[in-house]
Image (cartoon, rainbow, N blue to C red):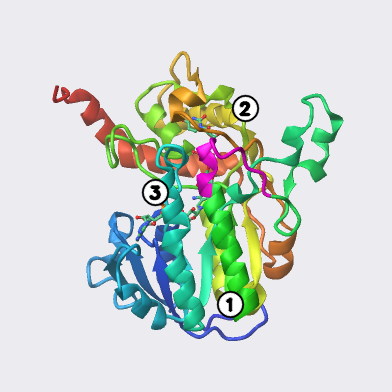
Amino acid sequence: MAGTTARVDLDGNTISPMTICMIGAGGFIGSHLCEKLMSETPHTVLAVDVYNDKIKHLLEPDSLPWSGRIQFHRLNIKNDSRLEGLIKCSDLTINLAAICTPADYNTRPLDTIYSNFIDALPVVKYCSENSKRLIHFSTCEVYGKTIGSYLPKDSPLRQDPAYYILKEDTSPCIFGSVEKQRWSYACAKQLIERLIYAEGAENGLEFTIVRPFNWIGPRMDFIPGIDGPSEGVPRVLACFSNNLLRREPLKLVDGGESQRTFIYIKDAIEAVFLMIENPARASGHIFNVGNPNNEVTVRQLAEMMTQVYSKVSGEDAIESPTIDVSSKEFYGEGYDDSDKRIPDMTIINKQLGWNPKTSLWDLLESTLTYQHRTYAEAIKQAIAKPSAN
Ligand SMILES: NC(=O)c1ccc[n+]([C@@H]2O[C@H](COP(=O)([O-])OP(=O)(O)OC[C@H]3O[C@@H](n4cnc5c(N)ncnc54)[C@H](O)[C@@H]3O)[C@@H](O)[C@H]2O)c1
Ligand SMILES: O=c1ccn([C@@H]2O[C@H](COP(=O)(O)OP(=O)(O)O[C@H]3OC[C@](O)(CO)[C@H]3O)[C@@H](O)[C@H]2O)c(=O)[nH]1
């Protein structure tokens, strides 16, 4: 129960209750952070977002044990003068707000760049000017492509970790050409990282930068036509969940050859907790947060999800569970991809002693159980309902 035993940091010091201004609190990661902060700590959250559907269960009814420790502020950080006041009255600001679905990067590059760079500027400025601590969410996409991806396909060096492991302090950021607008997001994230780093160096801003590597779990994105637009394209977990729920083949972009490491949201949130409560160990650092043991190709992910969904739903898989699509067909002009993403864990291990725990199979089992329970009935009804036209 929150607040009954004193919380101590990794060095044995008592942690005082703090007020956290969490921007983007209504999203996937924000909702999990808020949930754990409410149930396990005495901290207060000023939850800022334009939506609150994913945290409604924490805001209502008033009788919840943490009511009074979480306040929702519906505001758009693009144009709301209340933002500075909220940052000023908090001990820590966590900025999660962003456009962060790849389908937007090449089709809405301006919105993507504004969201990930321009809109984050006032947050950095207010933190710096008011001497407030900032935890800023960047992305593993700042690494772009691996050095190994430029070697010939049969080069033995491709097997050498030096050519693919992504290290915060030494790996380069390798993006495609400007016409490949996919990289608008990574580039905007990289520039805001550099600005935060410079504010730390020149003006003493106390910051931590988080680079998430494909965090997945319940409440990620939306299911098209159910709790999001029918034509919307969410991230891969929700795309594949949608296909499985509708008994459609899973679409493999460009053969599903790209590789990703997936981490369970609950493991990743543990890492963020350590950053929140151990400022002396976390400040001034950039942290990869991922699970290097959970690497698969997108094709393997599709196969695993098909098997796991069959188990949790009790339905046999369809006859042809996957179908190939080109990236142009799926995402449109200007799409490009990261080939492989394995995080180096040295820095987060040394500073915070953190390691991920959950296997890909286990995290898919709990996540797909959630997807089935949450959406299967709604999908059945949507399919049964004759369409409007
Ligand atoms: N989930 C991942 O695996 C992952 C990977 C890499 C990076 N990240 C980064 O982590 C952060 C959070 O990601 P997420 O997966 O929770 O995404 P999300 O889209 O679920 O959450 C982002 C939230 O920010 C809010 N928001 C966006 N613009 C806003 C604005 N102008 N004013 C107020 N609120 C605004 C959105 O409404 C949304 O609720 C993002 O910065 C993203 O780039 C996430
Ligand atoms: O139906 C689909 C959807 C996607 N793919 C391919 O899967 C790979 C992963 O896609 P996704 O999870 O949508 O996004 P990325 O990993 O490419 O990018 C994200 O990483 C972190 C973050 O910054 C925020 O979450 C974001 O940029 C990819 O190869 C798709 O092409 C598919 O085959 N079928």
Segment tinted magenta in the rendering: 173-185
User: Mark 2 is on which residue type?
Assistant: Glu
Q: Which quadrant of the rendered structure holds the N terminus? A: bottom left
Proximity of marks 3 and 2: CB atoms separated by less than 8 Å: no
Question: Mark 2 or 1, which is nearer the eye?
Answer: 1
User: Mark 3 is on which residue type?
Assistant: Asp
Q: Toward the viewer: 268 or 327?
A: 327
Cα separation, mark 3 vs mark 1, equals: 28 Å
Q: Which residue is mark 2?
A: 257
Q: Which residue is mark 3?
A: 111
> Residue 10: image x %, image y %?
65, 76
Quick one: which residue is furthest to the front in this view? 178
Where disc 2 sits, the SS reads loop
Tag of residue 206: 1
User: Mark 1 is on which residue type?
Assistant: Glu
Q: Is residue 290 visible?
A: yes
Around disc 2, counting alpha carbons within 10 Å, would you say few (fewer than 14), some (14 to 19), or many (20 or more)? some
Proximity of marks 2 and 1: CB atoms separated by less than 8 Å: no
Mark closest to the chain's N terminus, 3 or 1: 3
Residue at left offset 52%, top offset 28%: 307
